[in-house]
Image (cartoon, rainbow, N blue to C red):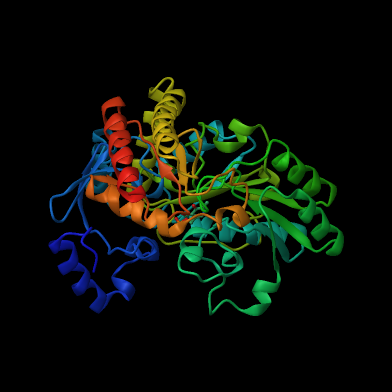
């Protein structure tokens, strides 16, 4: 056991391992990629998280993306409490579901209708079923290092969690399903064109994280997404943007708005639940009306559109609407942090780069630029592990893998950022020594 987790976390882990596989309900929480042990969270407030040992961390995991305004924002807490007091689940439609659908459709380009589900995994899985039904084709193209949840079709070269554990594919994924998933390199549209040529009339959709978070932050080259758009149009396939991470984070209209390329189907999660379990997929009316009960494509969920999650999501969308300059402020704060980190990296002579856009960033121990999984995989993960531990000891919590995005929130003010930069400088000095 590593000394970066405290005695109470260690005690909880040894209990958890008895009852929960690996002691955690999602693999990355086990900290295996950074050679440590799971840290058990006790509470959070604003930019901070406290563990069960009462250690305080400046948090850049941010629940893996949803906490745009930090932990336990009073407006979201209040929305959750009052919704729960009216009933936690009905299995009947509620007025708030229409409110959130109207709001999302108004904010996101090209989305006329949406269907709420319970997670990002459900959203991507259902959107691909719809794409296959619409086109009458089976194959999909995905990109190495992009993660789209843990449905069978996507667990092929699936980025962060899977890559971190060294499992390029997962046992249990039928070979037939895997054969229908063609894997290209991010930022390489030529290979996608070759797939279309070699699989004429067989590819239903190209699914992509328009800005990747799941191999660390990797930006699309200027023309990459546009080329995917053109290839899909030319081949009558659908372009699916997985905006589970980027939706409402890069802009109110997500990556589509920020990067100016439109998708046929878009998936969401995280932010639209304000930290509660939710997901959604949406697109133009003609596609979405194929979903049951309007159309034949079956997809359902007992807890879909759950009133507590929807209330939290609406409170989050209210906060976004009520915070002028939110996205420029978040970007300026991220830039302040990145500039501080880069100064230390240069001062200490590290072969490393910080890739960022909006409020997402990753420090790669790689000279950069990192443009694809091939590049990302060459990062010095051992050095990242030492860096992560050195930072934890200084009260800064990064996602426990080189291949993850860090998230800035509106609660991280300049003082918090400057404290982070100082801690990073000291951690880099320690690992260089
Ligand atoms: N798609 C992307 C881009 C994600 O980052 C994630 C999760 O991190 C998912 C899909 C899966 O979402 P969930 O974990 O809610 O199932």
- In this picture, residue 376 sits left or right of residue 70: right
Q: Residue at x 23, y 58 (%)?
A: 4
Q: Residue at x 65, y 73 (%)?
A: 177
Taking depth in this image into account, of 298 and 225 the one nearest to the observer is 225
* Residue 88 visible somewhere in the drawing: no
Q: How many marks?
A: 0
* Residue 316 visible somewhere in the drawing: yes
Residue 321 image point, x, y percent: 42, 26
Residue 329 image point, x, y percent: 41, 24
Residue 195 image point, x, y percent: 80, 60
Q: Residue at x 42, y 62 (%)?
A: 302
Residue 164 image point, x, y percent: 46, 64
Image vertical order of residue 326 relative to residue 348, above or below: above
Taking depth in this image into account, of 139 and 7 the one nearest to the observer is 7
- In this picture, residue 199 sits left or right of residue 39: right
Which image quarter: residue 131?
Answer: bottom right
- In this picture, residue 197 sits left or right of residue 306: right
Q: Residue at x 29, y 34 (%)?
A: 422
Q: Residue furthest front?
A: 433
Q: Residue furthest top?
A: 324
Q: Quadrant of the N terminus?
A: bottom left
């Amino acid at each position: 056991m590593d000394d970066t987790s405290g005695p109470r976390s260690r005690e909880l882990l040894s209990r958890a391992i008895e009852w929960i596989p690996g002691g955690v309900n999602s693999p990355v929480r086990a900290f295996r990629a950074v050679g440590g042990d799971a840290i058990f969270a006790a509470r959070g407030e604003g930019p901070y998280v406290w563990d069960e040992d009462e250690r305080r961390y400046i948090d850049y995991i941010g629940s893996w993306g949803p906490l745009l305004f930090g932990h336990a924002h009073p407006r979201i807490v209040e929305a959750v409490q009052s919704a729960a007091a009216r009933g936690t689940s009905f299995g009947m439609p509620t007025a708030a579901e229409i409110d959130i659908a109207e709001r999302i459709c108004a904010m996101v380009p090209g989305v006329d209708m949406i269907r709420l589900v319970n997670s990002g995994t459900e959203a991507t899985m259902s959107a691909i079923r719809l794409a296959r039904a619409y086109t009458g084709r089976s194959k999909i193209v995905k990109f190495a290092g992009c993660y789209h949840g843990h449905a069978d079709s996507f667990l092929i070269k699936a980025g962060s969690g899977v890559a971190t554990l060294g499992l390029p594919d997962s046992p249990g994924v039928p070979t037939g399903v895997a054969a229908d998933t063609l894997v290209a390199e991010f930022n390489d549209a030529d290979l996608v064109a070759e797939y279309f040529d070699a699989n004429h009339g067989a590819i239903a959709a190209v699914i992509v994280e328009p800005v990747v978070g799941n191999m660390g932050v990797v930006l699309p080259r200027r023309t990459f997404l546009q080329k995917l758009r053109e290839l899909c149009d030319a081949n009558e396939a659908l372009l699916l943007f997985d905006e589970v991470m980027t939706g409402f984070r890069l802009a109110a209209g997500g990556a589509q708005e920020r990067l100016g390329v439109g998708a046929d189907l878009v998936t969401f999660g995280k932010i639209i639940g304000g930290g509660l379990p939710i997901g959604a997929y949406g697109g133009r009316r003609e596609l979405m009306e194929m979903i049951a009960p309007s159309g034949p494509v079956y997809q359902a969920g007992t807890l879909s559109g759950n009133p507590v999650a929807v209330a939290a999501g609406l409170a989050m969308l209210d906060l976004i609407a009520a915070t002028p300059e939110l996205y420029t402020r978040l970007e300026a704060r991220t830039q302040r942090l990145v500039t501080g980190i880069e100064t230390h990296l240069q001062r200490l002579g590290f072969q490393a780069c910080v890739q960022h856009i909006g409020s997402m960033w990753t420090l790669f121990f790689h000279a950069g630029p990192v443009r694809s999984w091939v590049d990302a995989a060459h990062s010095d993960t051992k050095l990242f592990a030492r860096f992560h531990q050195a930072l934890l000891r200084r009260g800064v919590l990064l996602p426990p893998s080189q291949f993850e995005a860090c998230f800035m929130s509106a609660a991280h003010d300049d003082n918090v950022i400057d404290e982070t930069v100082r801690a990073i400088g000291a951690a880099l000095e320690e690992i260089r020594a």
